[in-house]
Amino acid sequence: MVATLATSVSAKVFIVGDEKGWTLNFDYQAWAKDKLFVVGDQLVFKYAYGKHNVHKVNGTAFQQCSIPPTNEALTSGYDVITLATPGRKWYICGVGKHCESGGMKLFINVLSHAPSPPPPSVYPGKVIWVGDDKGWTLNFDYQAWATGKRFYVGDKLVFKYPVGKHNVFRANGTAFQQCIIPAANEALTSGYDVITLKTPGRKWYICGVEKHCQLGLKLFITVLPYPTYVPPPYHRT
């Protein structure tokens, strides 16, 4: 028997005790421990007709197994209780000593609404030091350095070099291949140039100082869409 069956998009039907139903010598508090009960859900107390019953009680009657009047009992053997209001709810069996000795009592806490599912985590981006310890310099193979690395939207490239010795230009594919230097006012020149990768696709960077680009001070990368963490499907239990 499935423990919970959906009655609508949000409401659920809980078979109390799952396949055991409403019976003697079963730990109903352990059964309820990890479940989430929300207004609109239904409890189904399933048992052999005439063998048990169900009483709605308050906290004191629950603790003391005080049985309400007989005419308040649910006795169908398939008693359905809709959880209409939030708060604490107590249920006991009023037959014989079933509450005191048989453990036939259930306490739950009903919420007004289900909590929202956890949001997907946001990719924070990582900082990538171009050239690692070498930085942005001559006589270094930047394409070999970039091979095998993954660059994502949200990552940051850091070009580190002595101020005045190099610079960084964003270029297109043609300018990259031919080492065509853009206008001087487009250069990054701080010696600690941080470029945030904001869009996916191919990106080209070159140094515009003298013949540094022709000497290999150039970098081409492909930026991937940022990775997203998709949480597992959210299920109430």
Image (tube, rainbow, N blue to C red):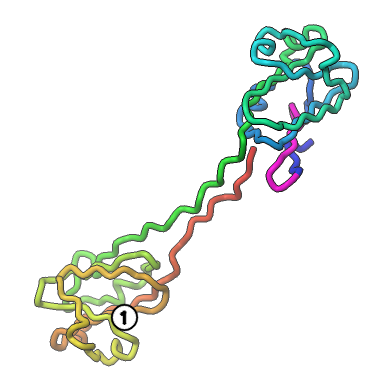
Q: Please tell me in which quadrant of the rendered image residue 125 appears.
A: bottom left
At a point 56% along the width and 45% down the height, the residue shown is: 116
Pick the front one: 18 or 66: 66
Residue 191 x %, y %: 15, 70
Identify the image quadrant of the N terminus.
Answer: top right
Q: Quadrant of residue 50?
A: top right
| Farthest-out residue, right | 50
Q: Position of residue 225 (x, y in %)?
A: 45, 69
Q: In the image, what residue type sits under mark 1?
A: Trp
- Observer able to see residue 210: yes
Position of 13 relative to 131 (above/below): above
| Residue that appears at 46% across and 53% down | 121
Q: Which residues are magenta?
A: 8-18
Q: Position of residue 199 (x, y in %)?
A: 40, 73
**Residue 41, magenta (yes or no):** no
Q: Is residue 173 left or right of residue 215?
A: right
Picture residue at 61% right of the left edge, 31% below the top: 34
Residue 14 located within the stretch drawn in magenta: yes
Camera sees residue 3? no
Q: In screen coordinates, is 59 left or right of 195?
A: right
Q: Residues within 10 Å of mark 1 (few under 14, many from 20)?
A: some
What residue does disc 1 label?
Answer: 204
Name the image quarter holding the C terminus: top right
Residue at 32% from the left image edge and 79% from the top image edge: 220
